[in-house]
Image (spheres, helix red, strand yellow):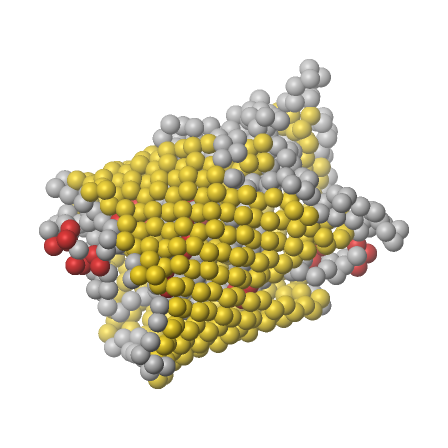
Amino acid sequence: MKAYLLLGVASTTLTLAPAHAQDTASPIDTSPATEQGEDLDQENMIIVSGRAQKLYRAGETSSGKLETPPLESSLVITTIAEQLIEDQGARDAQDLYRNISGVSFFSYAGVTARGFRQEEIFYDGLRGDPYAGFSVPQLFNVERVEFLKGPNGMLYGPGAPGGLFNYITKKAQDDVLEGKVKAIAGTEDRWGGSAEINVPLGNGFAARGGLFYEDRGTFRFNAASRTTIADGGVSFDPGPVRVDIQATRYDQELDANRLRGVPVDDDGEFLTDRRWNHNEPSDFLNLKSDVVQMRLEAEPVAGLTLDATARYNTATEVQNYHEPRGLFDSDGDGVIDATIREFRDQIRTQETWSFGANAVWEADLSATVRNRVLFGFDHFLADTFFQGRSLRGTTTDTPGLPNPLSLFDPQYGLSDPATYNQGPFRVTISDTKQTGFYLLDELTIGRLILTGGIRRDDSDADGLVEGETTYRGGLVYRITDEISAFGQYATSFEPQSASSQNPLAGGPFAPTKGDIFEGGIKTALMNGRIQSSLSAYQIRRTNILQSDPRGDVGNDGVDDLVALGEITSKGIEFDIAADVTPDWVLTLAYAYNDTRITGDNGGGGFSNNVGDRFANAPEHQLGFWTRYQFPELGLATALGGDYVSKRVSISGQPVKPYMVFDASLIYETGPFRALVRVDNLFDKTYAASGFIDRTGHFPGAPRSAFLEIGYAF
């Protein structure tokens, strides 16, 4: 479990910057501490200079379509910068979830965001996630991660109301020759390395390339992974035009790693070892994915900026795994001690095209009035293919069927898929087209900033044509140069899944919809020494499909559905980052969330009842990250803590609260850097999230450690 830094509660965008980075617009450059020589020399360039503003720099982001400083934005965006990713030794998206207040792990690449399950992932503002199906995004070629909170339909089209991830990829730069190599070794047979280089080629041309490989076991029996990423790109930036072309190959081999949870009892206690795995050693999940992307940026005339991006991805994910299908008592002693298993043989492929373009016009209408107008569109094409078959076993060893597996004494290798009496494959092919046009206006009148936007989306999913309009409105008032008050209203929608649109079940159904009311205060006090934010929000999610209480209304053999459900999420988030001393920095964040079922159809659908808390939505989250540095030694130490309160699983089983701690030690001198990380410092046994009763809760990782050594030039 990675030590984490809680960033950006209620839209303060906090990012980690290198010690030698200078920002002439930042108050840090003229602060008393800087005048006293607080910055470190280049010989011992230890990460930060001891200032919260420099360590967690508030900067502009791209996820809001209009790049805007946090104190001037009504959006709620958390940014995790490359330096933070490196400091935490993060390898994949799961290592970063706890850096974002209001976000907690759900499963695989999915999270609970402000009470709702969220799986929306964008790259450079476009759809086209290269990690098809159940693989987790890796971070090697990612410059920063931005999480845009709340319903964002007006900016990005269909999506969950909790928010979305936008991964900003690394691109070639023509102003610096630099490179770095790293090696890593750790517990659980972890080892690997990486190399990157950026080369200016002259006349505005530049090239970069990178190669990453890591082999590691995991704490679950039989599970391991081998990941290779090859990434390269070229850029041409003569001004006022810039062109970036990138190509990336992702290759993951995951042994016995299509992981479910570990079964629990009705008190939320694991029934067996947290290392228990339902998969056989021969099971696997392998992904191969290729991405090509081209981006054009231009400023043809003063005040007008243009950008256009095209992204192509093709990916294949092949899986063989054993799914837990039912717990039972194998010896009749009244104790649940085994599970039935189902073998699944699956192939998923996807081929996607994404296009997006934006035009921004900016003008000063008077000495105190400024206006920015954004017009844009995006278009997404996806061809997906699924081929799968499954075979369920029984409670006894039966030839030709998957054998059951003991919870307490699992015997692997006794069940061979080559001997299974498998049936034919089931094939599903799907084609999706989606186009959106949007208009956004930002008007600044003195200290008041007003924003309003509208978007129209039209889609065709296997012949089902739908259209939806979404809106956004926001306001910011600069109370002083250091304090802003903000508010926003925004809407979102999600088309119903293709499997739910069967006319025999009452379909097609209108999309699920969401909206948000939010308001708060952001500050950057004492020349940025103390950054804080406070916000309160309410999100509603409506038109959720549930089972029709009348069952099969038309006597056509298919149970009917009805769209009547409602979930309401209310929350308060508070964040502060401050200098305790010139060498001691502390961040503290607290998030309260109350997500409850507020409407159903009166007869089923939801696992829980009206008034109950929604699954995997914690009521309280509290986190801290503190670091102290010893400049004369080139050392920095850090300690992080993460508390998540009690939740309920999808099946209504309790998920117990937990608090875990992580620590790191960093040494840096000249071009050399070493990082020692210890995760789950006190080896806490806990559930990171709950799922359903037959598959159990997802266990948190036990204590682990690694050493990473790097050289930069």
Front-lying residue, 399 or 595: 595
Left or right for 388, reference 89: right
Place of residue 22 in the rendered image (x, y in percent of width and height, measured from the top left): 21, 60
The quadrant where residue 511 appears: bottom right
Left or right for 259, reference 341: left
Quadrant, the N terminus: top left
The quadrant where residue 282 appears: top right
Front-lying residue, 708 or 581: 581
**Picture residue at 27% right of the left edge, 53% below the top:** 525
**Picture residue at 55% right of the left edge, 74% below the top:** 437
Place of residue 598 in the rendered image (x, y in percent of width and height, measured from the top left): 65, 46
Residue 448 can be seen in this image: yes
**Picture residue at 30% right of the left edge, 55% below the top:** 524
User: Residue placed farthest to the left in the image?
Assistant: 36
Place of residue 273 in the rendered image (x, y in percent of width and height, measured from the top left): 52, 25
Front-lying residue, 430 or 663: 663
Residue 283 can be seen in this image: no
425 relative to 170, above or below:
above
